C-alpha cells in the first residue's frame, strides 16, 4: 500500500506519542508511581510504530518487551491510558492493575504479554495455527529481541510454523544488548535473519531506525503471510538508548556504556531522522511539528491524570480470576 | 451399558467431542498412529486438520495448543508421557495456568493437556512418573486422574468443555482395564469423588492405578477389616468433603498415591484431613506413596513405587 501524506504524518505522530509516553513512564517509576519494572523502548519507536501500522485490527500482536509493547499498541490504534494505569497498579489498567506491565487487549489481537522471554515463539505459533484454521486471513506479528533469539523455543516454533506455512511474521528487535550482555558474545554470526534459511523462509535485515524501511519489509511479509505464503523473519537493527530496565546499570558485561557511545546511537534516532525527511519532502512543516508535539504533551497530561485519578483494585477480584466461568 | 476398556473410553470421548464441536482438535507427537492407542483411528475419521502430528518438539506442541486455545479453539494436546510435561513447563505452568488471571480475566485458555502417567512398566525414571503434585501445586490448572473407563470418558468430555486449562493424566497401567460405560452420552462433573467400595473401619483414599491396588487389598482383608475406598477422580478441584465424610464415619484413613511422598498429593490430602477432621481421627493418618527418589527401572521399580503390601501394612498400622 502506498502511504499518503496523512499516513506519513500519523507514523511520525505515533512515534512522538510513543516516546513521550515512554518518558512519562520513566518519570512515574522515578516518582514511585509505577509499581513494577520499566524497560524503556527509546530507540525502537520506528520499529514498533512502523510494523504495527501494517496490521489489521484483528491481526494478532505479540509486542516486544521494550517499551512494554506500547509502540506496537499505539501503532495499532490504542492510546496509552490503560497502559499507564496498569503500570500504576490501577483497576482501570489493561489487566485491572494486577499484571504489573503485561498488557492484554484482545480486541486489538493482543492476547497477552509474558514475563518469560522466548515464550512468544510457541504461543505465537498457536495464534498462527488458530489464524490459519479460522481462515480469515489474519496474521500474527510476533516480536522478540536479540536476547530472545537465543532461546531454543525459537527453533521449535520457526520449524513448525514453516512446516505448516502459518501466517506469522517473526520480527526481531536487535538492539545489540540482552540486559547486560552484547549479542556479539551470544550468537556466532552477524545477522539473526540468517536463521531463516534453516527453515526455508525469507529472512531480511532492515535498518530498524528507519521507519519506512521497517514498514516496507513488514508489509511485504504480512502480505505474503496473508496470501498463504507462510512465515518470514525480519531482523531490525535498532539501538537501546537506556539501561535494560530503569534503575539498573547501563553496562556491557561489567563495563559502563559511555555517553559517547549512546550519543552515537542517537544520531540514528528514528523520530528525528524521519522528521528531517518529512520536512525536506514538504510533508511536514516546523509549525506542524510543534503542533504534533503540543498535542502529544496534552495527551500525556491527560493520560497521567487518568491513571492518578483511578482507584486501585479490590482484593475481592482475585479469587474470581483464578478460573474462567 | 456396554463393555469397553480404559483406552477406548478415552478414544470415544475424543471422537464424540471432535464430532460435537468444530473447535476441538488433537495435536501431538504421533497422535495419528497413537503411542498408547488413545488417539488411534481418529485421523481416518476426521482427517489431518483435526488430528495433527507434530515434530518431536514439546514446547511447540504445548505452545501451539495453548496459543490456539487463547485464540478460540479447544485443543487437546497429547504429550505422550507425563514426564514430558516438564519440557513444556513455561507453556503449561506459566502461560496456560496464569494468563487468565494475570490478564484480568480477558483471556481464556480452554486447553486439555493429556499424558500417560504411572509405573508398572519398569521403564525408569523419565517414563514412569506421576507428576500430579506439580500440577496440583500450580494455581490455575485443573487436574483429572481417572481410574476406570467410566471415569476416563466422562471426565475427559468435561475437561474438553471446560473454559480453563485441564491436565488429564491417564494411566499407562490401566490402558487395557475393562469396564462398563453407558450407551448414551454422559459427563462427570469435576470435584466429585467416587466411593469405589463402601466400608466402615478404615477409609483408603486412592488415586488412579492405586484405586485398583487398594480394592485388591480391601478384598483380601475383607474378613478382618471393612475398607472404604474413596477415589477423588479430580485432584483440582479436590472433593475434600466426601473424603472427610468418610473419615468421620471410619475414624481411620490411609492415603495412597503413586507420586512422591514428600510434598506429594498424599501430604496435601493428609494436611487437609488433619485441619478439618482431627477430632474424628482414632489414629494418625497413614500415607503410602512413591519413595523420595527417582523411579528405578527394571526389577527395582517395585521397591520405589507403592505395592499392595505397603497398603496392607498401612491399614494394619491405623487399625492397631
Image (spheres, coloured by chain):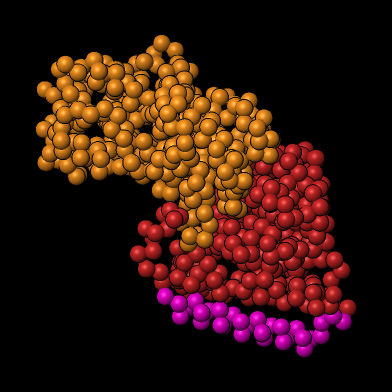
Chain colours: A red, B orange
Towards the viewer: B97 or B75: B75
**Residue A48 rendering spot, x and y as whole percentages:** 70, 64
Magenta highlight on residue B290: no
Note whether residue B130 is visible: no
Q: Could you say which quadrant of the image residue B288 lies in?
A: top left
Residue found 65% across the figure and 81% down from its top = A296
On screen, residue B317 versus residue B2, left or right, reads: left
**Residue A245 rendering spot, x and y as whole percentages:** 56, 61
Residue found 77% across the figure and 86% down from its top = A288
Position of residue B227 relative to residue A91, above or below, is: above
Towards the viewer: B110 or B296: B110
Residue span colored magenta: A282-311
Overall secondary structure of the magenta section: helix
Magenta highlight on residue A286: yes
Residue found 47% across the figure and 24% down from its top = B4
**Residue B57 rendering spot, x and y as whole percentages:** 62, 34
**Residue A155 rendering spot, x and y as whole percentages:** 68, 40
Position of residue A178 relative to residue B150, above or below, is: below
On screen, residue A234 versus residue A72, left or right, reads: right
Residue found 32% across the figure and 32% down from its top = B231
Q: Residue furthest bottom?
A: A287
Q: Residue furthest right?
A: A281
Q: Which of the image's four quarters has the C terminus of chain B?
A: top left
Amino acid at each position: 500500500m502506498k502511504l499518503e501524506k496523512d499516513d506519513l504524518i500519523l507514523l511520525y505522530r505515533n512515534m512522538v506519542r510513543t516516546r513521550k509516553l515512554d518518558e512519562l513512564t520513566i518519570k512515574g517509576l522515578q516518582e514511585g508511581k509505577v509499581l513494577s519494572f520499566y524497560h524503556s523502548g527509546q530507540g525502537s519507536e520506528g520499529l514498533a510504530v512502523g510494523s504495527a501500522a501494517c496490521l489489521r485490527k484483528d491481526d494478532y500482536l505479540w509486542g516486544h518487551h521494550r517499551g512494554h509493547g506500547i509502540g506496537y499498541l499505539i501503532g495499532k490504534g490504542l492510546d496509552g491510558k490503560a497502559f499507564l494505569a496498569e503500570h500504576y497498579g490501577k483497576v482501570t489498567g489493561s489487566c485491572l492493575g494486577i499484571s504489573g506491565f503485561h498488557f492484554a487487549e484482545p480486541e486489538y489481537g493482543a492476547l497477552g504479554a509474558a514475563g518469560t522471554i522466548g515464550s512468544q515463539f510457541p504461543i505465537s505459533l498457536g495464534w498462527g495455527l488458530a489464524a490459519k484454521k479460522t481462515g480469515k486471513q489474519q496474521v500474527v506479528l510476533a516480536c522478540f529481541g536479540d536476547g530472545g533469539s537465543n532461546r531454543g523455543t525459537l527453533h521449535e516454533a520457526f520449524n513448525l510454523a514453516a512446516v505448516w506455512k502459518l501466517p506469522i511474521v517473526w520480527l526481531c528487535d536487535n538492539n545489540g544488548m540482552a540486559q547486560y550482555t552484547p549479542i556479539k558474545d551470544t550468537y556466532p554470526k552477524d545477522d539473526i535473519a540468517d536463521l531463516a534459511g534453516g527453515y526455508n523462509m525469507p529472512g531480511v535485515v532492515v535498518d530498524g531506525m528507519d521507519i519506512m524501511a521497517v514498514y516496507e519489509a513488514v508489509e511485504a511479509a504480512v502480505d505474503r503471510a496473508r496470501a498463504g505464503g507462510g512465515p518470514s523473519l525480519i531482523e531490525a537493527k535498532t539501538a537501546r538508548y537506556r539501561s535494560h530496565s530503569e534503575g539498573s546499570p547501563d553496562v556491557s558485561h561489567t563495563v559502563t556504556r559511555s555517553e559517547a557511545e549512546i550519543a552515537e546511537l542517537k544520531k540514528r534516532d528514528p523520530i528525528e531522522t524521519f522528521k528531517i525527511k518529512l520536512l525536506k519532502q514538504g510533508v511536514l512543516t516546523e509549525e506542524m511539528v510543534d503542533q504534533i508535539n503540543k498535542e502529544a504533551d496534552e495527551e500525556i497530561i491527560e493520560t497521567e491524570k487518568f491513571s492518578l485519578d483511578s482507584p486501585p483494585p479490590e482484593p475481592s477480584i482475585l479469587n474470581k480470576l483464578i478460573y474462567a466461568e | 451399558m456396554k463393555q469397553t476398556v480404559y483406552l477406548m473410553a478415552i478414544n470415544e470421548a475424543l471422537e464424540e467431542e471432535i464430532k460435537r464441536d468444530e473447535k476441538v482438535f488433537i495435536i501431538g507427537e504421533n497422535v495419528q498412529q497413537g503411542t498408547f492407542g488413545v488417539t488411534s483411528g481418529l485421523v481416518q475419521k476426521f482427517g489431518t486438520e483435526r488430528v495433527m502430528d507434530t515434530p518431536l518438539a514439546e514446547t511447540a506442541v504445548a505452545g501451539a495448543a495453548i496459543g490456539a486455545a487463547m485464540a478460540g479453539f479447544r485443543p487437546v494436546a497429547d504429550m505422550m508421557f507425563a514426564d514430558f510435561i516438564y519440557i513444556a513447563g513455561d507453556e503449561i505452568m506459566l502461560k496456560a495456568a496464569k494468563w487468565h488471571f494475570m490478564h484480568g480475566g480477558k483471556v481464556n485458555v480452554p486447553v486439555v493437556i493429556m499424558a500417560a502417567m504411572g509405573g508398572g512398566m519398569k521403564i525408569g525414571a523419565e517414563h514412569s512418573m506421576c507428576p500430579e503434585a506439580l500440577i496440583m501445586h500450580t494455581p490455575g490448572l485443573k487436574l483429572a486422574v481417572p481410574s476406570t473407563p467410566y471415569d476416563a470418558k466422562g471426565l475427559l468430555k468435561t475437561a474438553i468443555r471446560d473454559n480453563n486449562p485441564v491436565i488429564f493424566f491417564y494411566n499407562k497401567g490401566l490402558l487395557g482395564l475393562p469396564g462398563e460405560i453407558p450407551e448414551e452420552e454422559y459427563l462427570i462433573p469435576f470435584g466429585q469423588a467416587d466411593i469405589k467400595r463402601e466400608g466402615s473401619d478404615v477409609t483408603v483414599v486412592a488415586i488412579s492405578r492405586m484405586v485398583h491396588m487398594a480394592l485388591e487389598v480391601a478384598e483380601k482383608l475383607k474378613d478382618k477389616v471393612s475398607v472404604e475406598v474413596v477415589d477423588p477422580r479430580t485432584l483440582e478441584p479436590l472433593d475434600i468433603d466426601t473424603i472427610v465424610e468418610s473419615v468421620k464415619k471410619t475414624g481411620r484413613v490411609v492415603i495412597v498415591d503413586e507420586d512422591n511422598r514428600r510434598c506429594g498429593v498424599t501430604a496435601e490430602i493428609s494436611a487437609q484431613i488433619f485441619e478439618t477432621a482431627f477430632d474424628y481421627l482414632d489414629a494418625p493418618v497413614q500415607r503410602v506413596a512413591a519413595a523420595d527418589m527417582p523411579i528405578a527401572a527394571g526389577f527395582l521399580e517395585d521397591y520405589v513405587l507403592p505395592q499392595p503390601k505397603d497398603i496392607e501394612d498401612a491399614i494394619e498400622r491405623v487399625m492397631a
